[in-house]
Amino acid sequence: MEWFTQVLPVWLAAPDAEWARQILQRGVAALYLVAFVSTLNQFRPLLGERGLLPATELLAAGRQRGPTLFRRWCYNDSKLVAVAATGILVSALLVVGLPQTGPPWLPLALFLGLYGLYLSVVNLGQVFYGFGWEMLLLEAGFTVGLLGSNQVPPPAPVIILIAWLVFRLEFGAGMIKMRGGTEWRDLTALDYHHETQPMPNPWSRQAHLKPHWWHRCEVIGNHVAQLGVPFLLFLPQPVASIGAAVIILTQGWLVATGNFAWLNWATIVLAAGLLGDGVLHGLFPAVPADLGAAAATADPGTIPAYWTVIVVAGTAGLVVASVPALRNLFSPRQLMNASFNRWQLGNAYGAFGSVTKRRIEVIIEGTETTTEAGSESGAEGRPPDDDAAWLAYEFKGKPGDVRRRPRLVAPYHLRLDWMMWFLPLGGIRQRWFYALLARLLAADPAVLRLLDRDPFEGRRPRYLRVRTFRYRFATAAERRATGQYWMRSEGRIVIEPVDGR
């Protein structure tokens, strides 16, 4: 018993990780806050009772991905609002650090609450919540809750779990690239990526216009950061901090050149949690070196026995859950962004195993014209031709208007915009897309709020059509001559005019 109450708590303590606890818990809570705000704003028009893919139909068919608070027939939009609002409130409390001043179980309980609420949402989210950063947020929230409150030292096994999570993120992404398209092996991937990524940001064009040698260096740097550096995370300080710093810098470059929701921000937060207190104080003298002194010098006998049991059990559970992900890392058929259990813990991660080389944009256009242009018959109901006043719907993040500079939206996640990028890759005839067209024809206010500009200002268009174009960034000379950020060509109609009557 003395070993359990005196020796084991000392062995579990990581006194050099108090700043890590603050960064990890508050940073992950901030990302949950963003995720729940995104859910509050977007879930109902996408997946609500009158959504493009109603969650009620999913539940009625029993096809939800896993556990959810919304049991069969129990979903309604009011309950969704309550879940999102609760998530926002709890996240905000953890960001400011109030629960961390209480007993060690309190932050854990609140993070488990966030995990359960968001898992309930994700499991109803279908394609709109099918991104790797959803499961990353779930696993990160579950893990950082085990760091406890300021009343106990940060547990060393949980810091190791964070290192293991970052390792899976980075090494998994590196391996999926090496097994993927040849562009990663011949060092040409970044010749295309900045231009063809799902949602470029204001600086993506400048990154794309860099010379070829620069892009080669980017790819080499990516391989080093993802295939070599992650192993440093398991070595003693300050080596672990050096590895974490390299990952933070490379992820910062991705933040500066793209919009990947909270994927890069989550990786930065998790890697920053691996910077030791001593290293942080050495780099930034204003950072107190003794933040964790009180917890570090606490009498081990004052650490509740139940907390030691929780830390050991939680660590063991996450280790066991991640065994399939370990196998997956070295499998020739490596899976990308895969969960091996219904709780989405111990997941496999990875992104961009291949890079799209041409950017195809789907443009939705409407018109109020009721007859074919040039017709003298006055008959209505004939689809108008290209001479009619076709006006494009503009999305908040995805390219459309060639004169509009790409926007910075991350870590916020524009779910509809992202799915529009996937359309040319997976086929235009998808259920949710036809539902979107129907709602636009009906001028549905909830769906229109997901867009940046409705060219008809709330009126119902008479016809809709869908065209695709090849988009590429304007060169410096083209930008000066035309004022455009994008050049587009090869326009073709993929869905003929649909009558909105």
Image (tube, rainbow, N blue to C red):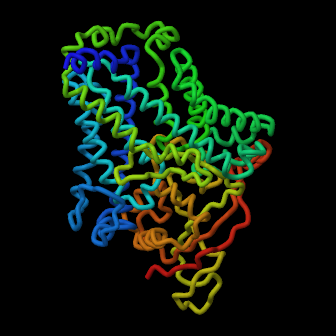
- Residue 51, by quadrant, is bottom left
Measured as percent of width and height from the top left, residue 402 is found at: 65, 54
Q: Nearer the viewer, residue 372 or 361?
A: 361
Toward the viewer: 97 or 149? 149
Q: Nearer the viewer, residue 34 or 144?
A: 144
Vertical relation: 372 (above or below) 246: below
Look at the image and tell me in which quarter the C terminus lies: bottom left
Residue 279 in sight: yes
Which residue appears at 30% of the width and 69% of the height? 62
Towards the viewer: 192 or 242: 242
Q: Is residue 73 above or below residue 11?
A: below
When the figure is inspected, residue 46 is found, relative to residue 239, above or below; the finding is below
Q: Position of residue 167 (x, y in %)?
A: 52, 35
Residue sitting at x 28%, y 47%: 116
Q: Residue at x 50, y 71 (%)?
A: 430
Q: Is residue 3 left or right of residue 356?
A: left
Q: Give how far across and how far down residue 199 sits, in percent.
A: 57, 49
Can residue 446 be spotted in the picture? Answer: no
